[in-house]
Amino acid sequence: MQKVNETRATDDRGKHTTTHRELFLMPNGAAIIDTPGMREIQLLGADDGIEQSYEDIYKLAEHCKFNDCSHKQEPGCSVQEAIETGELSESRFRGYLKLLREQAFAQRQVDKRAMLQEKKRWKKVTKSSRKR
Ligand SMILES: [Zn+2]
């Protein structure tokens, strides 16, 4: 019912194979849920996900003095204010920052890959035009 993959010979660890969540009902009434590991690349386009998960922070940010506020040290930052008053917990804010960093990292990896592919493509193009 599910795609499976060999485990790695070096450390017997599995590889991420399935990419979607699925619930299986067993004949004996038990339920098994497959929750595949998240690949880094899936963070891409996760902007909406971050915005949904941290809606409170985005709402607060609407009242920041600066549109491009990083909520770290800018004056008139509503997010920092909410942390000070206890309206927003510091650990929640840290979780939000961590997710942003991970997303930026994943984006950079993809950008790097895209750049290399583009380079390769141009190499081919210039090679074939030289032949002509
Ligand atoms: Zn702010």
Image: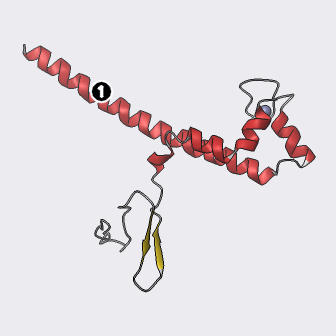
Q: Tell me if residue 30 comes above or below residue 56 in the rendering.
A: below
Mark 1 vs ligand 1: CB below 8 Å: no
Q: Quarter containing ligand 1?
A: top right
**Mark 1 lies on residue:** 119
Q: Residue at x 24, y 26 (%)?
A: 121
Give the x, y percent position of residue 110.
42, 38
Say which element carries label 1: helix
Q: Which coloring applies here?
A: secondary structure
Tell me if I can see residue 107 in this picture: yes
Give the x, y percent position of residue 124.
18, 25
Q: Residue at x 37, y 73 (%)?
A: 11
Toward the viewer: 132 or 5? 5
Toward the viewer: 59 or 118? 59
Would residue 56 appear left or right of 10 to someone viewing this image?
right
The quarter of the displayed image where residue 132 is located: top left
Q: Tell me if residue 80 comes above or below residue 87 in the rendering.
A: above
**Counting other residues with Cα less than 10 Å from the Cα at mark 1, is it few (<14), some (14-19), or many (20 or more)?**
few
Q: Tell me if residue 35 comes above or below residue 70 in the rendering.
A: below
Give the x, y percent position of residue 65.
82, 24
Tell me if I can see residue 72 in this picture: no
Residue type (three-letter) at the residue carrying disc 1: Lys
Would residue 43 appear left or right of 80 to someone viewing this image?
left
Give the x, y percent position of residue 42.
47, 47
The quarter of the displayed image where residue 83 is located: top right
